[in-house]
Image (cartoon, rainbow, N blue to C red):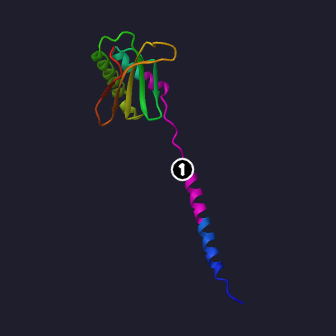
């Protein structure tokens, strides 16, 4: 009778497969998804109060988007000039950022400026200002008023 040399190899292979499955299942079980951050009613009230203190209008929308930006979208009916748009976006962005920074909700902020809709399902975008902590405010103009 000849000894079966394949048996120990199969045992090692089975043990390695079992170990891999155990590690994968334990790793999956311990990973938890972080819940998506959302703006609370208190966050929204804080932002609106910051804008009101600077005599700025309220945005038409506020959101914390999937990229982590706190986005305030304003609709301006009659912008005076390109300089006005940039100044408005910068002032609004800094008012929001300065008030929300202590809450540690995000380190990325954006203000988007739109004009009146030129037609159904159309948006007239004047531009947007962005800020990421550690950087500077960036203005991205889209059209000249």
Q: Determine if the magenta segment contains residue 58.
A: no
Magenta region's main secondary structure?
helix
Residue 84 in picture, x, y percent from top left: 29, 15
Q: In which quadrant of the rendered image does the N terminus lie?
A: bottom right
Q: In which quadrant of the rendered image does the C terminus lie?
A: top left
**Is residue 3 shown above or below 69?**
below
143 left or right, relative to 7: left
Q: Determine if the magenta segment contains residue 38.
A: yes
140 left or right, relative to 65: left
The answer to which of 57 and 20 lies nearer the viewer is 20
The answer to which of 79 and 61 lies nearer the viewer is 79
Residue 24 in picture, x, y percent from top left: 57, 58
For numbered disc 1, what is the local secondary structure? loop
Q: Which residue lies furthest to the right in this view?
A: 1
The answer to which of 39 and 136 lies nearer the viewer is 136
Instruction: Name the residue: 38% across, 30% down.
Output: 109
**Is residue 12 shown above or below 138?**
below
Residue 114 in picture, x, y percent from top left: 41, 18
Instruction: Name the residue: 49% across, 28% down.
Output: 40
What is the magenta range?
A: 19-46
Residue 55 in picture, x, y percent from top left: 34, 13
The answer to which of 119 and 105 lies nearer the viewer is 119
Occupied quadrant, residue 75: top left
Occupied quadrant, residue 123: top left
């Amino acid at each position: 009778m000849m000894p079966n040399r394949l048996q120990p190899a199969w045992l090692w292979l089975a043990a390695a497969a079992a170990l891999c499955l155990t590690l994968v299942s334990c790793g999956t079980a311990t990973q938890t998804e972080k819940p998506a951050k959302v703006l609370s009613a208190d966050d929204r009230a804080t932002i609106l109060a910051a804008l009101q203190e600077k005599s700025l209008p309220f945005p038409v929308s506020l959101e914390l988007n999937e990229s982590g930006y706190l986005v305030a979208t304003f609709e301006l009916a009659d912008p005076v000039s390109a300089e006005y748009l940039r100044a408005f976006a910068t002032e609004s962005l800094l008012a929001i950022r300065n008030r929300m920074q202590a809450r540690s909700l995000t380190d990325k902020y954006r203000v988007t400026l739109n004009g009146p809709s030129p037609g159904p399902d159309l948006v007239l975008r004047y531009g947007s200002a962005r800020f990421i902590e550690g950087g500077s405010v960036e203005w991205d103009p889209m059209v000249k008023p």
